[in-house]
Image (spheres, grey):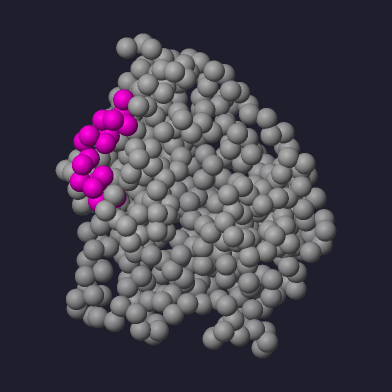
């Protein structure tokens, strides 16, 4: 699939842009008026780069971010006293819910009773976590990091070292954190190019990487045919440009092509973990060489991990020329610290269990069906996709089949209005896109609250009230 045309833009054509601008201005005025403390905090943050502790927090529709006061389960409150049903959940980092009691208890035990938050010494919890991740994702050996970005970087170093090849292949508009190599897209001419907005790339990304469109096996084969590809590093479904799902046979085709061209396969489950207890690796019976995961498995404590097949791990450890202990570029002083490992064990053992996933996926299905019904009721040619416990709507129908299509189907003005409308009425979506994520404490009543507000927003957009 190489066609990059938007499946349909008819849904956007129905929106009166003057009405949209007026509604957005009204919602922005209401947002500002209701949050004087957040506004003052933002305006007074002169010693922070971009006025926020991390520049991504500036992704906002209201002119400044909402400032957090408290969070529990799937509820957050801001410093102005407003409570929100949280469908963003830290853009997956809080998929277990905020401050789950089991995670809090494990953290308190480590901090207050046992001590030693970071020691560069292993704990027995680490083997339990490794064994549980092996059960879920079918990778035998595990190593920890502080973020999935780091886990991806270290996996890339390992595959380059063991294969002797330099190039990594990615999907266009993939999400692998801030990994330099991954900021590559398929350009208008069909060739790999630096992704727009890539900040200060150390080298031209086409020197390190190639891109293929998602769901495009011929394009992937062209990228592999050069013979210099160490690995294909992919999300098994795109998640940060809408949820783009695999067409039948696509993932099997990816695995077959990597084997045909002697390249390794790395699956990044950081977001696709929503598909189930073992992510898409288990749900879709993928056979990767390495699995990367992060964010959600720590219950909110920073952590990441990468799992290796037994064959790949043995190959790496057998190489005397690889410095895997000190300066080999595959570690960090704080990685695998006792605090993050304790949080991972509590999250996997007590929170994001097989039973919890069944509830979360059922709730997400209810969310998806309700949104789809609203699109039908108001004859909007928009669409929604679901990946386990997460769902996301896009302003196109049918849903885009690759990252470039999904990027072209975005509408920043419409997204800003919907985010403002929802947040002004106590509903919080992921600010980067229209994604809703369910955690174990999300209920159908929470979903109904979203649908009621979303339906009201649609009616106002269409001039029906």
Residue farthest to the top, as pictured: 464
> Residue 304: percent from the left, percent from the top?
45, 65
Would residue 30 be counted in the magenta stretch? Answer: yes
Q: Which residue occupies 32% across, 57% down?
A: 46
Is any atom of residue 260 visible in this view? Answer: no
In the depicted structure, whether residue 345 falls above or below residue 253: below
Q: Quadrant of the C terminus?
A: top left
What secondary structure characterizes most of the magenta part?
Answer: helix
Q: Looking at the image, which is closer to me, 47 or 67?
A: 47
Q: Looking at the image, which is closer to me, 176 or 69?
A: 69
Q: Is residue 288 left or right of residue 303?
A: right
In the depicted structure, whether residue 219 falls above or below residue 29: below
Q: Which residue occupies 35% across, 48% down?
A: 89
Would residue 456 be counted in the magenta stretch? Answer: no
Residue farthest to the left, as pictured: 81
Is any atom of residue 50 visible in this view? Answer: yes
Q: Looking at the image, which is closer to me, 333 or 31?
A: 31
Q: Quadrant of the N terminus?
A: top right
Q: Quadrant of residue 50?
A: bottom left
> Residue 94: percent from the left, percent from the top?
35, 53
Q: How many marks?
A: 0
Q: Is residue 254 left or right of residue 442?
A: right
> Residue 452: percent from the left, percent from the top?
30, 24
> Residue 398: percent from the left, percent from the top?
58, 26
Q: Which residue occupies 67% across, 41% down?
A: 215
Span highlighted in magenta in the image: 26-42
Q: Is residue 257 left or right of residue 279?
A: right
Q: Which residue occupies 57% across, 25% down?
A: 397
Q: Looking at the image, which is closer to me, 30 or 128?
A: 30
In the depicted structure, whether residue 328 falls above or below residue 344: below
In the depicted structure, whether residue 38 falls above or below residue 146: above
């Amino acid at each position: 699939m190489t066609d990059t045309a938007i499946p349909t833009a008819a849904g956007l054509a129905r929106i009166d842009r003057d009405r949209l601008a007026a509604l957005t201005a009204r919602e922005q005025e209401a947002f500002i008026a209701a949050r004087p403390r957040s506004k003052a905090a933002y305006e007074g943050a002169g010693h922070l780069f971009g006025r926020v502790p991390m520049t991504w927090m500036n992704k906002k529709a209201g002119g400044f971010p909402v400032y957090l006061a408290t969070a529990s389960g799937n509820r957050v409150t801001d410093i102005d006293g407003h409570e929100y049903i949280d469908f963003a959940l830290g853009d997956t980092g809080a998929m277990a819910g905020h401050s789950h009691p089991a995670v809090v208890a494990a953290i308190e035990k480590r901090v207050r009773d046992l001590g030693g938050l970071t020691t560069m010494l292993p704990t027995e919890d680490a083997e339990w976590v490794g064994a549980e991740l092996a059960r879920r994702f079918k990778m035998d050996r595990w190593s920890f990091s502080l973020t999935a970005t780091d886990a991806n970087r270290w996996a890339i170093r390992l595959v380059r070292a063991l294969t002797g090849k330099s190039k990594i292949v990615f999907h266009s508009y993939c999400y692998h954190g801030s990994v330099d190599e991954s900021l590559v897209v398929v350009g208008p001419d069909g060739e790999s190019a630096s992704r727009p907005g890539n900040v200060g790339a150390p080298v031209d990304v086409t020197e390190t990487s190639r891109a293929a469109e998602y769901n495009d096996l011929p394009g992937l084969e062209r990228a592999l045919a050069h013979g210099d590809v160490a690995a294909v590093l992919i999300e098994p479904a795109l998640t940060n440009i809408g949820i783009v799902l695999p067409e039948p046979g696509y993932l099997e085709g990816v695995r077959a092509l990597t084997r045909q061209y002697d390249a390794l396969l790395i699956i990044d489950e950081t977001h696709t973990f929503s598909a189930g207890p073992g992510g898409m690796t288990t749900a879709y019976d993928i056979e990767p060489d390495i699995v990367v995961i992060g964010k959600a498995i720590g219950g909110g404590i920073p952590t990441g991990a990468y799992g290796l097949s037994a064959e790949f791990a043995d190959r790496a450890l057998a190489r005397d020329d690889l410095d895997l202990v000190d300066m080999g570029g595959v570690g960090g002083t704080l990685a695998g610290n006792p605090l993050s490992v304790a949080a991972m064990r509590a999250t996997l053992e007590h929170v994001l269990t097989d039973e919890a996933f069944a509830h979360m996926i059922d709730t997400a299905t209810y969310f998806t069906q309700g949104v789809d019904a609203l699109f039908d009721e108001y004859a909007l040619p928009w669409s929604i996709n679901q990946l386990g416990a997460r769902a996301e709507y896009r302003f196109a129908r049918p849903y885009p089949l690759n990252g470039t299509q999904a990027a072209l189907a975005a509408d920043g003005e419409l997204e800003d209005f919907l985010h403002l409308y929802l947040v002004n009425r106590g509903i919080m979506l992921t600010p980067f896109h229209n994604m809703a994520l369910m955690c174990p404490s999300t209920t159908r009543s929470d979903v109904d609250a979203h649908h009621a507000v979303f339906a009201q927003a649609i009616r106002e957009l269409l001039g029906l009230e």
